[in-house]
Image: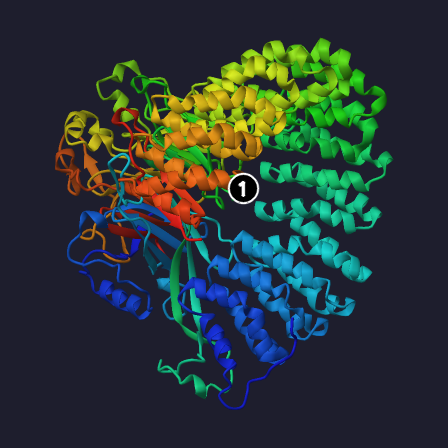
């Protein structure tokens, strides 16, 4: 696995202990970017907790969403001759309030502003576009730059004083002048009122014309340009809700085949649908499920087999699923069992009872592929995250923490000791902090740069620069 | 339009002020004001004169692409009509830069409008200007970095191609080829949708050599959304080619599309079937399209079956006359029979909306023997929409076999719809009553349907009672005043003594609707006494509706009745204790009352009569 060095702490929400951090903060101020959204540096509130992380298709931008409904977009620094190592640093590019808390008066329900998912659209012109969603509403945002401003009025002076109309003897056409760079985010479309349950996924189709939004029981298909209609293509709601045995936990379009989509369920299975066959995809064309091992069956079997995330590989050949204890890689051509199964934190198998009591067992960990599909990454507790190299079969546990990772220092692999004697540098299972968890992470689409969200902190690590 | 360039005046010209405001508001914070200014762009340009419009206004507008969509849309539209304002065709190329930047924005409607304007002004370019200014712009767009500009380019090739030299023509063809195999599906979609249009301006040899290969490639694109657009292009291309080339150049692709794996592509084929049929001609239709159509009617996806079902009549109509009947009877009708009992109600209802049309094509005997059982089956369908679609198209059958053949089944179907639990279904059938009455004749109507029409008057849903009232008026228009006097009026007037005040009001509403068609005699002698008597009703709602009715039927009455009978009653109502009754009485007396809408009239039977809750007055 690549040994990642911590190049840039990119702390945009927590206090700056390191000198480098201070320097960087000042620099981002000089960029004239509106960072009034950046929070008080000394404490984190619930609203600051990062709820999703996503690179754009070129990797030049990185977006995070948080529980407070905000989206922060980071831009990668361009390489300069004087500071070549700064290539790889991400700085705040734009921050905006994507969603606000709402109240559904008909159902007497509060709708949280928390951003559940962000998906970037491929770039179509000088501006960037992303979809962000909370539980109910998907929004299409445009992030654009403006560096020219019109100047010159007829009815007022340069200093804003109104001119006497009788003194107007000629007409002035405004002229555009260069100004400081401004980055603006505007909501271009709002896709609402299509979900009765909570949206857990959004995914853009390779036709770049449509996308799906998925809630617990349904998948809806939208045209990116049309907000007043969507088509329900999957509906697993039984006539009687008491017959409900599973819910949809995630869904994604195939990266190349516009007609293929996959969705996972709380019972640990994945269904692949072919949208060419029928307008309604209630019947799947492939069903991926591993038969349960009767010897390990317990009260928790069903809960821990629930799939929290699915991701197609960039090649489109494989599908990765994450359940509570493992990551599995499936070949789309083999439905009976995964081609690879990786244990993320098998040492928790004995602690399921207490994890059930503190609700941790319901945590939804995400998983990501690297650009070449050779390495996969997913999170764990104690701010640990895991990487598995599919070719060498090696794996590593790393930690995202301010104390243990200094800028540009190499991250030390961590180890959890399972029984027996604890060696130096090892952590015992009992000392793991279950309130610190890495649920959301992202991998740069081409390079070895990863973004890891730990509570209200975002860590960006890069493969060692030579 | 006055076309006089007016340059800035010398000393505090008053006429400059409004223009100065318009220019400043081009960048007002309020979108509405900006939009307003953009819409008056021609006024600004006129005031600035052609020179300053070219050198100052257009450069400014070229960079104003950050605005809201609606402003950009208006701008794109304005610029299409700007030729005279920049100095005529000689200078029309000055409009290209702002339109070029609008053609690259991400909003499709704006881009499309910019392309539309570019197409428009391309006609105003001289052949030389077209090559010097316009064609380079098309090339720039076609090779732009972003797909937005490349999609826009697709719509511009066809307007310049016919007017440029053969070298440039070759370049344009090359650009179009490149865009047809663009990396992004958006550009391929744009190219596919313009393929037919481009083919039309190409020389036939190039259609055969270039267009066909592009068409074949797009029709087998990996993206469903591209393939389905190729179906549309197929229609134009087939029209352009001589019959003998169709088989080798177009048909393989069309056959493939009709059997595409994706239902959306097959849907497109079904949807465009009539156009395709006309484009390929009778021989290919007989040999190829008939089996293809059969397959579409039996498709596994309901959307496709519904689209094909919609085309059944048109397809049959356009079959070559010599073999039409044979083809329908042996190939199409068996499929249609299956569709009558389809599992999907949309399919059945699509079929029901066209199936009656087959009777004119097949003639009396076939209709009675083969179609009638299908109509009857659909009249008994469980889905009300299917039944309604049959009933609403009865006229076609009426011409061929007369409606009597159907009446046995028709009546139960109508009665069932008339009593459907969904009021919208009841409403729909009421709307067909006048049509049915015309077709069935007065005798049948009196015998079977009159009772229904009267029953609707006391429906518990207001919308139904209202529609029933309107229906009566239309029936009287058809059957005449005498019929009304004998059958309808007595029943309507009888309701004036109903214990339910809502029914008593229905009498008044009916009188409002019927007075004019029934004429002065019936109105004065039969209706007026009832209305006047109702002015003593104990419910205020009835009393003020009496005032309203009196005003409504006033014009039909003679002046004697107005003076001696109506006026005293209105005057009495004017002294009513109820405020609303007084108000309407006064309105009626003064005759000022013109329009008044009652938005909410709460009818809660258990609470007894309620008064008007909200009144919205529109002053005359």
Q: Out of A238 and B52, give the one closest to the viewer.
A: B52
Question: Dot 1 falls on which chain?
Answer: A
Above-or-below relation of B280 to B53: above
Q: Out of A353 and B451, give the one closest to the viewer.
A: B451
Above-or-below relation of B419 to B284: above
Going by the image, does B190 lie left or right of A76? right
Q: Out of A41 and A419, give the one closest to the viewer.
A: A41
The x and y percentages for residue A95 are 32, 57
Q: Quadrant of residue B378?
A: top right
The x and y percentages for residue A219 are 42, 32
Q: How many marks?
A: 1
Which residue is depicted at the point 53% across and 28% down? B471
Which residue is depicted at the point 77% across and 61% down? B168
Q: Quadrant of the N terminus of chain B?
A: bottom right
Residue A190 visible in the shown view: no
Q: Quadrant of residue B232?
A: top right
Q: Quadrant of residue B110?
A: bottom right
The x and y percentages for residue B246 are 81, 35
Q: Out of A77 and A193, give the one closest to the viewer.
A: A193
Which residue is depicted at the point 46% across and 60% down? B68
Instruction: From the image, tell me which residue sits under label 1.
Output: A207
The residue carrying pointer 1 sits among few (fewer than 14), some (14 to 19) or many (20 or more) residues within 10 Å by Cα, namely many
Going by the image, does B545 lie left or right of B65? left
């Amino acid at each position: 696995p690549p040994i990642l060095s911590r190049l840039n702490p990119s702390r945009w929400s927590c206090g700056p202990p390191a000198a480098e951090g201070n320097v960087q903060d000042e620099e981002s101020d000089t960029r004239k970017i509106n960072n009034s959204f950046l929070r008080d540096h000394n404490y984190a509130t619930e609203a600051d907790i990062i709820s999703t992380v996503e690179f754009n298709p070129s990797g030049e931008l990185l977006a995070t969403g948080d529980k407070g409904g905000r989206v922060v977009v980071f831009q990668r620094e361009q390489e300069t001759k004087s500071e070549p190592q700064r290539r790889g640093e991400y700085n705040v590019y734009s921050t905006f309030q994507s969603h606000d808390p709402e109240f559904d008066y008909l159902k007497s329900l509060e709708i949280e502003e928390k951003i559940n998912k962000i998906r970037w659209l491929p770039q179509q012109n000088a501006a960037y576009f992303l979809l962000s969603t909370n539980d109910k509403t998907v929004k299409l945002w445009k992030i654009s730059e403006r560096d020219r401003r019109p100047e010159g009025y007829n009815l007022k002076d340069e200093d804003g004083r109104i001119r006497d109309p009788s003194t107007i003897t000629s007409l002035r056409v405004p002229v555009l002048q260069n100004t400081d760079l401004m980055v603006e985010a505007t909501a271009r479309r709002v896709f609402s009122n299509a979900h009765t349950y909570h949206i857990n996924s959004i995914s853009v189709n390779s036709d770049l014309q449509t996308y799906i939004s998925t809630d617990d029981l349904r998948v809806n298909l939208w045209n990116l340009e049309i907000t007043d209609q969507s088509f329900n293509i999957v509906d697993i709601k039984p006539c009687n809700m008491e017959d409900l045995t599973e819910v949809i936990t995630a869904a994604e379009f195939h990266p190349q085949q516009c007609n293929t989509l996959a969705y996972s369920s709380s019972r640990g299975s994945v269904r692949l649908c072919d949208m060419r066959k029928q307008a309604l995809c209630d019947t799947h064309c492939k069903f991926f499920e591993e038969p349960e091992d009767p010897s390990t069956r317990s009260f928790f079997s069903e809960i821990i087999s629930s799939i929290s995330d699915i991701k197609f590989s960039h090649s489109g050949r494989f599908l990765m699923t994450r359940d509570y204890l493992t990551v599995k890689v499936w070949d789309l051509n083999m439905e009976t069992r995964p081609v690879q199964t990786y244990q993320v934190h098998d040492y928790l198998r004995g602690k399921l009872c207490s994890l059930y009591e503190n609700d941790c067992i319901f945590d939804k960990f995400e998983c990501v592929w690297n650009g070449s599909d050779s390495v996969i990454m997913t999170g764990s507790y104690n701010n640990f995250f895991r990487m598995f190299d599919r070719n060498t079969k090696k794996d590593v546990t790393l930690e995202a923490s301010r104390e243990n990772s200094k800028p540009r220092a190499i991250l030390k692999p961590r180890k959890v000791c399972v029984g027996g004697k604890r060696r130096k540098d090892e952590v015992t299972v009992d000392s793991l902090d279950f309130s610190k968890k890495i649920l959301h992470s992202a991998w740069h689409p081409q390079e070895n740069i990863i973004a890891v969200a730990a509570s209200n902190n975002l860590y960006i690590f890069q493969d060692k620069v030579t | 339009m006055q076309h006089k360039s007016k340059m800035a005046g010398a000393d505090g010209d008053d006429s400059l002020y409004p223009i100065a405001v318009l220019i400043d508001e081009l960048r007002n914070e309020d979108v509405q004001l900006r939009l307003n200014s953009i819409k008056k762009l021609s006024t600004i340009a006129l005031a600035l004169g052609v020179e300053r419009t070219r050198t100052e206004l257009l450069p400014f507008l070229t960079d104003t692409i950050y605005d809201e969509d609606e402003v950009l849309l208006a701008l794109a539209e304005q610029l299409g009509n700007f030729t005279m304002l920049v100095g005529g065709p000689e200078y029309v190329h000055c409009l290209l830069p702002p339109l070029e930047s609008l053609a690259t924005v991400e909003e499709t409607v704006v881009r499309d409008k910019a392309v539309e304007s570019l197409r428009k002004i391309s006609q105003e370019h001289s052949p030389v200007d077209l090559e010097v200014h316009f064609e380079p712009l098309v090339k720039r767009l076609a090779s732009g970095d972003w797909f937005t500009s490349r999609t826009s380019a697709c719509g511009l090739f066809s307007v310049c191609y016919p007017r440029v030299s053969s070298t440039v023509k070759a370049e344009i063809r090359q650009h179009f080829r490149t865009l047809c195999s663009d990396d992004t599906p958006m550009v391929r979609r744009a190219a596919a949708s313009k393929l037919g249009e481009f083919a039309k301006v190409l020389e036939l040899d190039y259609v055969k050599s270039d267009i066909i290969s592009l068409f074949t490639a797009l029709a087998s694109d990996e993206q469903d959304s591209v393939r389905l657009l190729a179906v549309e292009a197929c229609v134009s291309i087939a029209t352009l080619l001589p019959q003998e080339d169709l088989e080798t150049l177009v048909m393989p692709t069309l056959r493939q599309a009709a059997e595409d794996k994706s239902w959306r592509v097959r849907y497109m084929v079904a949807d465009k079937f009539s156009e395709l049929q006309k484009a390929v001609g009778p021989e290919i239709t007989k040999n190829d399209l008939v089996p293809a159509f059969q397959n579409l009617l039996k498709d596994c996806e309901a959307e496709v079956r519904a689209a094909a079902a919609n085309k059944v009549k048109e397809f049959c109509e356009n079959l070559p006359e010599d073999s039409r009947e044979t083809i329908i009877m042996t190939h199409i009708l068996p499929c249609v029979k299956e569709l009558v009992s389809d599992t999907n109600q949309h399919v059945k209802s699509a079929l029901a909306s066209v199936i009656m049309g087959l009777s004119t094509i097949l003639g009396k005997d076939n209709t009675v023997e083969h179609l009638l059982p299908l109509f009857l089956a659909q009249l008994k369908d469980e889905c009300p929409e299917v039944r309604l679609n049959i009933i609403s198209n009865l006229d076609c059958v009426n011409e061929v076999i007369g409606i009597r053949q159907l009446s046995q089944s028709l009546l139960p179907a109508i009665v069932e719809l008339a009593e459907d639990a969904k009021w919208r279904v009841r409403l729909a059938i009421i709307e067909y009553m006048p049509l049915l009455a015309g077709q069935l004749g007065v005798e049948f109507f009196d015998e079977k349907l009159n009772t229904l029409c009267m029953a609707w008057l006391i429906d518990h849903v207001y919308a139904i009672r209202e529609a029933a009232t309107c229906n009566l008026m239309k029936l009287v228009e058809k059957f005449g005043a005498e019929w009304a006097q004998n059958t309808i009026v007595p029943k309507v007037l009888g309701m004036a003594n109903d214990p339910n005040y809502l029914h008593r009001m229905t009498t008044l509403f009916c009188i409002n609707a019927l007075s004019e068609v029934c004429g002065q005699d019936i109105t004065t002698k039969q209706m007026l006494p009832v209305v006047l008597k109702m002015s003593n009703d104990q419910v205020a709602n009835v009393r003020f509706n009496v005032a309203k009715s009196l005003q409504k039927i006033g014009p039909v009455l003679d002046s004697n009745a107005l003076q001696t009978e109506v006026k005293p009653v209105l005057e009495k109502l004017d002294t009513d204790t109820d405020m609303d009754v007084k108000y309407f009485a006064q309105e009626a007396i003064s005759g000022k009352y013109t329009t008044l809408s009652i938005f909410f009239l709460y009818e809660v039977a258990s609470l007894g009569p309620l008064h008007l809750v909200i009144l919205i007055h529109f002053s005359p």
